[in-house]
Amino acid sequence: MKPSRTLQLTEELIARPSVSPDDAGCQRQLAGLLQPLGFRCETIESNGTTNLWARKGSEAPLFVFAGHTDVVPTGPREQWHSDPFVPTRRDDKLYGRGAADMKTSLAAMVVATEEFVAAYPQHKGSIAFLITSDEEGPATDGTKLVVEMLDDRGEKPDYCVVGEPTSSHVLGDMIKNGRRGSLSGRLVVKGVQGHIAYPQFARNPIHLAAPALAALAAEVWDEGNEYYLPTSWQASNIHAGTGANNVIPGTLTVDFNFRFSTASTAESLQARVHAILDHHQLEYELDWTLSGLPFLTPHGTLSTAICEAILAETGVKTELSTTGGTSDGRFIARICPQVIEFGPTNASIHKIDEHIELRSIDPLKNIYRRTLERLLAG
């Protein structure tokens, strides 16, 4: 049986080993499909990252499909049941690195756009693609950079669909209408190194820090809101000691992270952490890294259009959610009032034998096309 247009394009993209930040020619291939439709394609390169901004039309509203061509490393290739960069169909699934995250989404977006433009050549508004090869990496030279460029040029999207794999059990059962912010800290608590038999001549930073860490873990940072779970503080790594069991260490290092809702701000969380550490009279250094602010798209035009498209195509009633990690949606939300993430199921992403169900590929494309029809056909 001949593969569908979307399946064929997905397989062609998977065959390109685009481990972050190497695009491996994926964007060039996609641009070659978009240009005949009337898209003006720009390639923006920065520090090994390749970005594509492709736009058709100049009128409002501006609808953007966003995604990434880069994938995470394969892990031990001998543990895969087939070569991760040789797309393989078996057991009614398509296997390959990027199958779920997120080359199927990219293929579905492009084919959906082809079908929409063919059916509605005089559609209203504009359509654009914002594609990066830096989403799985530091995310400094990708979508963030392009968003800054668009902001400087005054190009402000009205709607954006990010093709992240958001579905939980079946296609369309969950979309993301926001994400929590991510705020990390590296705390170094200072003590005095000494012989473990003479604690009176030392100050053990492990003992000093323990009550403060317990207080941080027990703190209620906020109650969340109708869209978000409460903010969470989690320690991810603790290190102290010289490796010897008879030495009191001089310092203790703790890595921690906040996943925070719109009920808190990065500044308020930082202030409260410092207050707790100061209350316990610690001598410390604390370096902060804010990798993403929370963003939220309340119920509105875009979420309604996607939910209606999913229902019409699959019969599934969609749940709006803000759970999960960060995505490039956090950058796009700075210039776009309505950002929704929607894509295939995410159970196998970043894993050995990443895959997508074959039966979900064309419905995903159809949902993207139906969304365009609801927003731009009239």
Image (tube, rainbow, N blue to C red):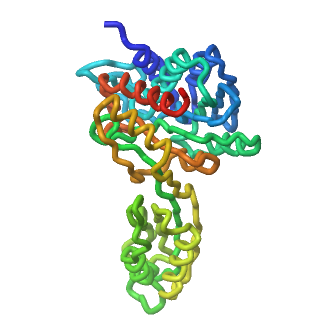
The answer to whether 291 appears left or right of 73 in the picture is right
Q: Residue furthest left?
A: 91
Residue positioned 43% across, 27% down in the render: 104
Q: Relative to residue 7, is residue 315 depicted above or below?
A: below
Give the residue displayed 36% in from the left and 25% down from the top.
Answer: 363
**Residue 41 showing in the rendered view:** yes
Q: Which residue reaches farthest top?
A: 1
Point out the residue furthest to the front here. 378
Q: Quadrant of residue 314?
A: top left
Q: Considering depth in this image, is 201 or 113 the residue closer to the camera?
A: 113
- Any part of residue 192 in sight: no
Towards the viewer: 218 or 79: 218
Name the one closer to the observer, 4 or 340: 340
Residue 97 sits above or below residue 252 on the image: above
- The part of the image, by quadrant, that contains residue 55 is top right
Residue 97 in the image: state x and y as whole percent: 41, 29
In the image, 100: left or right of 283?
left
**Residue, x 40% and y 33% (percent of image)?**
309
Q: Quadrant of the C terminus?
A: top right
What residue is drawn where x is 35% and y is 40%? Answer: 167
354 vs 26, left or right, is left
Going by the image, does 222 lie left or right of 139?
Answer: left
Residue 200 in percent (x, y) is at: 44, 92
* Pick the front one: 230 or 13: 230
> At which x and y percent is residue 8?
42, 15
